[in-house]
Image (tube, helix red, strand yellow):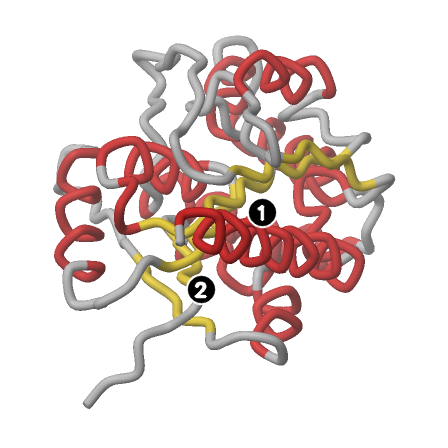
Amino acid sequence: MSIVPDVLWINTSPSLQCFHRPLLCYLSHHLTVAQWEYCQTQDEPCSLDVALGLLHNYLQSCDRPVHLVGHSTSGLLGLLYARRYPDKVKSLTLLAVGADPALDWQAHYYNHRKIMSRQRVLTSMAYNLFGSQDKCTINSIIKRLQKDLYCSLSPHSFLQRVSLPASGVPVPLMVCGGTDDIIIESADLQGWKDYLKAGDRLWLCPQGKHFFHYFQYQLVGEQIIDFWQFTQQSALLHASLLL
């Protein structure tokens, strides 16, 4: 019999998965963490609905709600799922997801591609996303970003940029961002304030850029664990008041 996880990490960008591992490892010392991965092939049309259906098929096997966590477009998928199936979600934690949840690094990439070469934009994005790194590391990041253009669920393309309306979610919500993230800037994060419920949280990591949870995994992990503990205590208190 399979073990039902406490936490489900959603990953829609397989080529960038390595940057999530430090935080996943930290969280797994506190709760049972599972990963759900979606890989987009070049021959398939990008469909959030298809991914939602596959995610729901997986969560149907879980006999209790789980904590959902996702970074960027993975967080977007988690957000859409929590809105559609709130009874399956104990809480939702979004990393680098703005009030327009469709905004991601690829939206910036395609915007700059209109005036710059592919290699130049990828090089610029590598530095913007991860900060100053040695040449070997930057080249490795560029290769991963290039693969992400073909294999991730991002709804953006050279021909269109997608925007989704800002809205809340009926489950406990935590939104995390980086103060020096140029993809999801402070204004994008502050836009969540109009949709936060009592008990929801908006937290900014002091540094780490777009992948702040990679560079500051312990600090981010501590904040997420504290939110989950608060959510659990609130649920127990609510249940006791109903008795």
Q: Residue at x 77, y 56 (%)?
A: 215
Q: Residue at x 16, y 34 (%)?
A: 49
Residue 71, placed above or below residue 101: below
Q: Kindly identify which numbered label has been placed on residue 68.
A: none
Tell me if mark 2 has few (under 14), some (14-19) or many (20+) residues whose alpha carbon lies within 10 angstroms of its own: many
| Amino acid type shown at disc 2 | Val
Q: Secondary structure at mark 1?
A: helix
- Nearest the eye: 85 or 114: 85
Residue 71, placed above or below residue 46: below
Q: Residue at x 73, y 36 (%)?
A: 203
Q: Residue 155 in the image: state x and y as whole percent.
A: 32, 27
Q: Kindly identify which numbered label has been placed on residue 7.
A: 2
Q: Is residue 90 left or right of residue 98?
A: left
- Nearest the eye: 238 or 75: 238
Tell me if mark 1 has few (under 14), some (14-19) or many (20+) residues whose alpha carbon lies within 10 angstroms of its own: many
Q: Residue at x 56, y 76 (%)?
A: 28
The quadrant the C terminus occupies is: bottom left
Q: Which residue is mark 1?
A: 142
- Report how far apart the C-alphas of labels 1 and 2 lie in the structure: 30 Å
Q: Secondary structure at mark 2?
A: strand
Pointer 1 and pointer 2: residues touching (CB < 8 Å)? no
